[in-house]
Amino acid sequence: YAFNGCTALEKIKLSENVTVVGASAFKNCTALESIELSESVTTIGESAFYNCDSIMNVNLPDTVTSIEESAFSMCTNLTDIKIPDAVTNIAKAAFSGCTSLASVGLSNHLTNIGEYAFSKCTNLRMLTIPNSVRYIGKSAFYMCTQLYSVVFPNRIRVIEPSTFEECRALVKVELPDSVETLHNSVFQNCVAL
């Protein structure tokens, strides 16, 4: 909660001594436009940048290994994000409600995409899920209304409920032979399929 609610804060530069951006550290800093993270940062804490709706892009250093729950949720002007290769898990709702997010570069070492991780990212159009991913949580891409193409990894066995529900532009889905279980509502209201 270091700077939680500092609505006039526009720019931050973290020193080399900072390894963790703590829980809710910059939550509701609605004027925050520029974030400079040092190469020593390993963890983006829960709700660290929640509702920082002036942020347009974030360069996550290669040292980041953990993106926790709701870390960038409701950053409505965030347009692109590249997940560093050291990240294996994207926590629940990490980028939920990032309505301008159009480009996501997922780590080639990513194994888990949490529940609601990218839900309501209404500008996300195309997604290639790396072969390293083994688990995608329920509603992970719920209501990504512009998402038109998804390529699944070869290792995925279960697709959880509502994973792509309300993805109304979805016209192409490639399910690998590894899929054993499709839960309820996975593609509900995907009217273009």
Image (cartoon, helix red, strand yellow):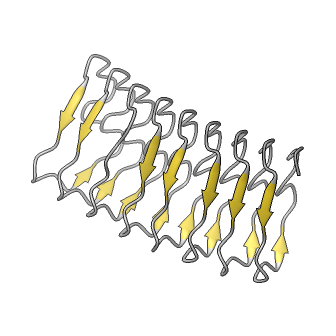
Residue at position x 51%, y 30% in the image = 76
Which residue appears at 40% of the width and 33% of the height? 56
User: Dividing the picture into quarters, in which one does residue 82 lie?
Assistant: bottom left
**Which of the 4 quarters of the picture holds residue 20?**
bottom left
38 or 174, nearer to the observer: 174
Tell me which corner region of the image, top left, top right, bottom left or bottom right, holds residue 161: bottom right
Q: Quadrant of the N terminus?
A: top left
Horizontal relation, residue 37 to residue 69: left or right: left
**Residue situated in front as seen by the camera: 45 or 144:** 144
Residue at 70%, 40% (x, y): give it. Answer: 146
Q: Is residue 169 above or below residue 135?
A: above
Q: Which residue lies most toward the top here? A: 8
145 displayed left or right of 189: left
Observer able to see residue 115: no
Task: Please say if 121 is above or below 90.
Answer: above
**Residue sitting at x 49%, y 70%:** 110
Q: Position of residue 2 (x, y in %)?
A: 24, 35
x then y, percent, for residue 53:
44, 27
Whether residue 136 is situated above or below residue 148 in the rendered picture = below
In the rendered image, residue 68, in percent from the top left (x then y), is placed at: 43, 54
Q: Is residue 16 visible?
A: yes
Q: Is residue 104 left or right of residue 29?
A: right
Q: Where is residue 58 shown, x and y percent of the image?
A: 34, 43
**Left or right for 157, reference 36:** right
